[in-house]
Amino acid sequence: MNILITEAEIGERIGQLGRQIEADYQGRPLTIVAILTGSLIVLADLIRKIQLPLRVALLQASSYKGATTSAGALIINESFAPDVAGRDVLLLDDILDTGHTLNTLVHRMADRGALSVKTAVLLRKKGRQEIAIEPDYCGFEIPDAFVVGYGLDYDDDYRHLPYVAVLPQLQGSGVDSDETGHYVRRTPQQ
Ligand code: XMP
């Protein structure tokens, strides 16, 4: 396991982001909408660093890549989503990769009547973005590698690691996401 970002580095950066968010919102109530499942850990740590009137809500988003659906179509489950009308919303995701997820959800929150919509990501992968979206808050920029830990999974494992790491056996192996949005190893035929 190649550790890319240590537990201490993450902790320090989350503290900085919390202070920055507090300063920007200047006491105004904030609704953090976290995107499941990868952002669970950063959500838990970040909200404890923010001294603002705060609501937390959850959305589930996954890129459906099944045979009958066009690649990358986004499935959004809003079962736990709050009423964001008239509220300042901060969308929180684990990683900004192509940008499709965050971009779609920014528009969704605006359509639901949010007063403002900002975005925060723990990680931003360099060289992969397809949609021009600038996160308002970003923990770390990382190289184009598949990472796990601190909420991020491979085949639903490794989320519980306290650091962010590159799985050596995945480097250059052509990982892809399955129908639930989880990354799996694909054979060349698939
Ligand atoms: P987009 O492409 O919409 O994707 O910005 C964001 C989602 O893709 C997943 N993702 C990863 N998950 N390790 C992971 O565990 C990675 O290196 C990785 N890159 C992208 C993630 O679910 C994120 O929410």
Image: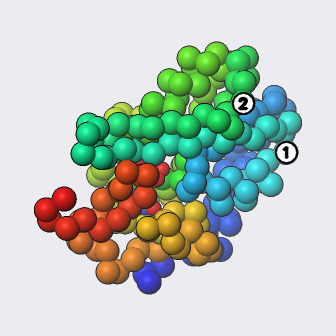
Tell me what residue is drawn at x 23 percent, y 71 percent.
Answer: 172
Tell me what residue is drawn at x 53 percent, y 25 percent.
Answer: 108
Q: Which mark is residue 82?
A: 2
Q: Quadrant of the C terminus?
A: bottom left
Q: Position of residue 16 (x, y in %)?
A: 69, 55
Q: How is the image coloured?
A: rainbow
Instruction: Determine the CA span between mark 1 and mark 2.
Output: 21 Å
SS state under label 1? loop
Nearer-the-camera pick, 12 or 163: 163
Tell whether 103 sits left or right of 144: right
Q: Quadrant of residue 33?
A: top right
Tell whether 102 sits left or right of 187: right
Tell whether 97 sits left or right of 157: left
Q: Quadrant of residue 34?
A: top right
Instruction: Choose the circle earlier in sequence order: 1 or 2.
Output: 1
Q: Position of residue 164 (x, y in %)?
A: 52, 70
Kind of residue at badge 1 = Gln
Q: Is residue 179 above or below residue 186?
A: above
Q: Residues within 10 Å of mark 2 (few under 14, many from 20)?
A: some
Q: Name the residue carrying label 1.
A: 51
Q: Position of residue 4 (x, y in %)?
A: 46, 73
Kind of residue at badge 2 = Pro
SS state under label 2? loop
Q: Quadrant of residue 92?
A: top right
